[in-house]
Amino acid sequence: MAAVNGPGSVVVAGSAEAVERVQAVCEEQGVRARRIPVDYASHTAQVEQIRTELAEALDGLTLAAPQGRVVPLLSTVTGQWVSPGEMDGGYWFRNLRQPVRFAEAVDALAADGYGVFVEVSAHPVLTVGVEEAVEAAGGQAVVTGTLRRGQDTLGQVLTSLAQLYVHGITIDWKAALGVAATDGSGAADGRMPMLDLPTYAFQRERYWLDAPPAATDATGLGLETVEHPLLGAAVDTAGSEAILLTGRLSLQTHPWLADHQVMGSVLVPGAALVEMATRAGEHIGCNRLEELTLEAPLVLPEQGGVQVQVAVEEADASGFRPVSVHSRVETGETPAESVWTRNASGLLGVPQQDEQRQAGLEQWPPAGAQPMALDPDELYAGFAGRGYEYGPLFQGLRAVWRLGDAVF
């Protein structure tokens, strides 16, 4: 094992035949492997063959006292911070002989709170290993290279600096670009002056408002406008008495629906389907919903919207008019490729003239009803524990009464 660069990136070295066997096994097992074009096996026992020659070449090597700013160095030989006087000739032999403990060094840096890693090399080969090591440790970091093979040198360096800048890293652009501050005297030293932006300094802030999408006038599209918070237009079907009401639901246009979640998904309440079916009946004079069966949940995606259709068919032999609620998620595909889901179906009717009015709830609470002990906060907390997460707009329960087997 010549180097451990990350949890999923290692380097092995040895004789050419052994390396070829390892590569063949990797390819057979679907492990990505490539041959590094070198004719010597560093970080292996083969280095021992030139130990004497290296010792003579490195003899007398000493570590000079650092000048100016001192940059700490964490060794990939020891996996520890380098101490003064440590990097002598013996250290550099071990550097060539022992495995490279790169991943261990990254782990140590990440544990110390370092979150920005810049690979200074002719081509980024270790950035992936750094990202893997940081991710495996459960952390986050900004990782970038400096140069890239086949790319313009200065342009690539500036691109790397820009990548750091957009991640919030402070860059000394005057030093990087060789510019001088504008002080009215010009740049006598030959450096170009730095100019402010025409309107305001770029501060990584956007000033555009997130306006809701504008609704198109239904009458301009040959439809009839429906004044309803969930449905927007209605269209009669030529040659029949059937009608179709349409609408569009999304968390951007109907943000209050986000207060109704089941198992982590925003679910349009069943009462809303009842409301849409009832509104469709009122549109044609059938203001009684005889029945409605909920068949499939109407789930709203985090982004985009859902198209809704409420269809009312012609009356059947009994005088009832079938009603159904369908939905289709906007996926960006062509309409022919999208799938409509029937969420509910039922019957609409008209109350008969001689139909007696059922006894209502003119008195509240009903006479004889006994109050029940209830803590609404505890109740909704229990719902949330079972996956029914009701936000403030759907937490309307305040009190409960019981009268026989009936609960009010």
Image (spheres, rainbow, N blue to C red):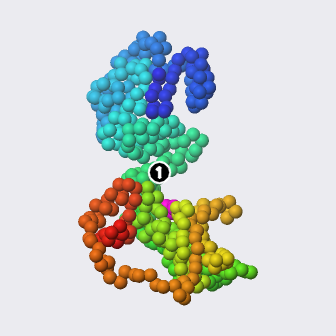
Q: Main secondary structure of the magenta part?
A: loop
Q: Is residue 184 visible?
A: no
- The vertical placement of 84 against 406, above or below, is above
Question: Residue 103: horizontal and vertical position, in percent?
Answer: 41, 32
- Residue at 56 percent across and 65 percent down: it is 343
Span shown in magenta: 299-303
Give the residue furthest to the right: 239
- Residue at 47 percent across and 67 percent down: it is 269
Q: Is residue 300 magenta?
A: yes
Q: Quadrant of residue 240?
A: bottom right
- The vertical placement of 245 against 73, above or below, is below
Q: Secondary structure at mark 1?
A: helix
Left or right: residue 23 compared with residue 275: right
- Residue at 38 percent across and 43 percent down: it is 139
Q: Quadrant of residue 325?
A: bottom right
Question: Residue 330: horizontal and vertical position, in percent?
Answer: 59, 63
Of 207 and 247, the residue lying toward us: 247
Mark 1 sits on what residue?
Answer: 163
Of 23 and 228, the residue lying toward us: 228
Q: Is residue 381 magenta?
A: no
Placement of the C terminus among the 4 image quadrants:
bottom left
Of 255 and 206, the residue lying toward us: 255
Left or right: residue 116 compared with residue 233: left
Question: Residue 155: horizontal and vertical position, in percent?
Answer: 53, 49
The mark total stands at: 1
Amino acid bearing label 1: Gln
